[in-house]
Image: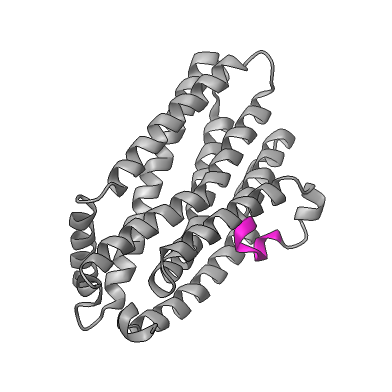
């Protein structure tokens, strides 16, 4: 545990020297301000559930690109130093685990910061209540759970194949979100929770439906399925990374 905490601290220090830290702050501030304005301006034209669905769907759409960009920036920094900092130590898997934990922690901070603007907008319009706050908190949990898989995926792509592969897959995943967002919820019920790229939009649409029906609650079964798949991918990724010695040695 002490080595993991040490690696986490080291990753935090490295992050201070990149633009990634600003991405985690500026994107939610700018996006939150813009969507808060939309939330207020369309108060009399659109139902609150439709406005929240649009906002949350937009986050689902941007999430793959942001994860890809952040992983690429991190790997570029590591590649500049020939991956020495990442591969140093007897248990180097803790180094990559610390990086993932840092990503997830900062994403949680960014989401809470973003939703703060929406809550302020809800207070301004007089539409804020405990159900809206509960829905936003649930969506925050769903976004974090959905993104862990993507961090593993894009770190693997960036380390193994290069940042180009990660960017391309990130774009494809965005298109996938658009596709799933246009499929009816009845069709989405056909095991969308077994498709990692459909998790975020599936969680959001199901939560909006719960809100409209007045039975808002944690999607326990879907959460368990996503966490089990993520855990399996984490184990496979950990085994691969343990035997990875840098792109120059393994990928020629």
Residue at screen point 27% across, 68% down? 79
Q: Is residue 15 left or right of residue 166?
A: left
Query: How far from the left and from the top, in percent, is residue 42?
Result: 62, 17
Q: Is residue 181 left or right of residue 170?
A: right
Q: Is residue 243 visible?
A: no
Q: Main secondary structure of the magenta part?
A: helix
Colour convention: one colour
Residue at screen point 45% across, 22% down? 120
Q: Is residue 173 visible?
A: yes
Towards the viewer: 172 or 125: 172
Residue 213 in the magenta stretch? The answer is no
The stretch in magenta equals 192-198
Residue at screen point 19% across, 70% down? 2
Q: Is residue 5 left or right of residue 39?
A: left
User: Would you place residue 18 above or below residue 10 in this image?
Assistant: above
Q: Is residue 78 left or right of residue 47?
A: left
Residue at screen point 48% across, 58% down? 167
Towards the viewer: 164 or 44: 164
Query: How far from the left and from the top, in percent, is residue 73?
Result: 33, 56
Total residue callouts: 0
Q: Quadrant of the C terminus?
A: bottom left
Q: Quadrant of the N terminus?
A: bottom left
Q: Quadrant of residue 132?
A: top right
Towards the viewer: 119 or 98: 98
Residue furthest front in the image:
252
Towards the viewer: 115 or 127: 115
Query: How far from the left and from the top, in percent, is residue 106?
Result: 34, 49
Q: Quadrant of residue 161?
A: bottom left
């Amino acid at each position: 545990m002490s080595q993991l905490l040490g690696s986490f601290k080291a990753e935090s220090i490295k992050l201070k020297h990149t633009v990634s830290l600003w991405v985690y702050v500026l994107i939610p501030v700018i996006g939150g301000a813009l969507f808060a304005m939309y939330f207020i301006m369309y108060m009399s034209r659109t139902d609150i559930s439709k406005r929240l669905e649009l906002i949350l769907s937009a986050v689902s759409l941007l999430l793959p690109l942001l994860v890809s960009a952040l992983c690429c920036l991190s790997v570029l920094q590591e590649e500049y130093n020939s991956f020495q900092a990442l591969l140093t130590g007897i248990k180097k898997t803790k180094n990559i685990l610390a990086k993932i934990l840092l990503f997830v922690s900062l994403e949680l901070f960014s989401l809470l910061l973003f939703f703060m603007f929406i809550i302020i907008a809800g207070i301004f319009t007089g539409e804020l209540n405990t159900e809206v706050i509960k829905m936003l908190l649930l969506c925050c949990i769903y976004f974090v759970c959905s993104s862990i898989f993507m961090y593993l995926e894009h770190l693997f792509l960036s380390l193994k194949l290069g940042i180009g592969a990660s960017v391309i897959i990130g774009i494809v995943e965005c298109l996938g979100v658009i596709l799933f967002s246009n499929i009816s919820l009845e069709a989405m019920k056909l095991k969308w929770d077994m498709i990692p790229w459909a998790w975020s939009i599936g969680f959001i649409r199901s939560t909006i439906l719960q809100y409209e029906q007045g039975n808002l609650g944690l999607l326990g079964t879907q959460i368990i399925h996503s966490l089990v798949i993520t855990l399996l991918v984490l184990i496979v990724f950990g085994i691969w990374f343990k035997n990875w010695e840098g792109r120059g040695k393994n990928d020629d």
